[in-house]
Image (cartoon, rainbow, N blue to C red):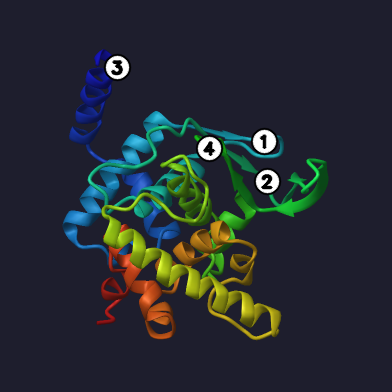
Amino acid sequence: MLFQWMKNRRRRKLASEPFPSAWLEIIHSNCRHFATLDTGEQSRLLRDIRWFVAEKSIEVSIGLVLTDEMRVTVAAHASLLGLGFPEPPFDRLQSVILQPEVYVGTRIVRDKSGLELHSEDARIGETSRNGPVLLSWKDVVRQCRDSPDGRNVILHEFAHLLDMIDGDVDGIPPMDSEEEFRTWKDVTRNEYRRLVNQSNLGRRTLLDQYGATSEVEFFAVASETFFEQPFEMKVLHPRLYDVLKSFYKQDPARRWGVV
């Protein structure tokens, strides 16, 4: 209880302080979503960014020097993901580690006999329960600032964290009701199968075909597309858009002027 009181006290103090003008320039440059938010949403996002930067350990690997641009860019997109919730949803996260670029990670798969199979693959991001979240800074800059392409590794990895909140990593984040849960399962599983089929047939898809890997990855990929290409998703995947809108309690298509 004392810890919570101290945290709330610190947060109130941070929220009362002027937002750094240099940080605001970074947000305008690296988070194109900010300009689409209304005044109340912008104020809430700036508040949550302050809290995120103050409470999370953002670190860099060899080859990088930590800057405010790194800290604020990560905080802005993580906070955007949680903007519709009553409070920021990433309290349990302790740290974010930025890698210079694509890095090699080890994948461990257990077969039916119990044998563990290890393989190495190139990655631009990954996370585990409560973190740390690993991100390729080169890809963050490319996706968020230089050449947005509908992908966003920050949104992707933090969506995984939302999936993990209830303890199950299954592509189903915590739902508000049994009805919402049933609708979510019906829509997302049909959309997942659709993506798998299209991927197998070699067809072009709006959703990154990495989402056909599993229902876990499908949720993260769909979350990216929901925020980065909301108009296209609303047209091509209206039911998927609606369940994500209900979960995130946000309507990015409307923010971009699409009814």
Label 1 SS:
loop
Label 4 SS:
loop
Q: Can the viewer see residue 85 in this picture?
A: yes
Q: How would you rate the neighbour count of disc 1 (Cα within 10 Å): few for under 14, some for 14-19, many for 20 or more?
A: few
Count of marks, rendered view: 4
- Tag in front: 3 or 1: 3
Residue identifier under label 4: 129
Label 3 SS:
helix
What's the amino acid at mark 1?
A: Ser
Please tell me which of labels 3 and 4 falls first in the chain: 3
What residue sits 28% from the left and 64% below the top?
Answer: 246
Numbered tag placed on residue 153 in the rendering: none
Please tell me which of labels 4 and 2 falls first in the chain: 2
Q: Are marks 2 and 1 in contact (CB under 8 Å)?
A: yes
Above or below for 25 versus 55 = below
Q: Can the viewer see residue 144 in this picture?
A: no
Residue identifier under label 3: 3
Image coordinates of residue 71 in percent, x first then y, are 47, 41
Label 2 SS:
loop
What residue sits 69% from the left and 50% below the top?
Answer: 101
Q: Is residue 122 rendered to the left or right of residue 223? A: right
- Tag in front: 4 or 2: 4
Q: CA distance from mark 4 to mark 2?
A: 23 Å
Q: CA distance from mark 3 to mark 1?
A: 30 Å
Answer with the quarter of the image where residue 110 lies: top right
- Tag in front: 3 or 4: 4
Q: Are marks 2 and 3 in contact (CB under 8 Å)?
A: no
What residue sits 28% from the left and 23% below the top?
Answer: 7
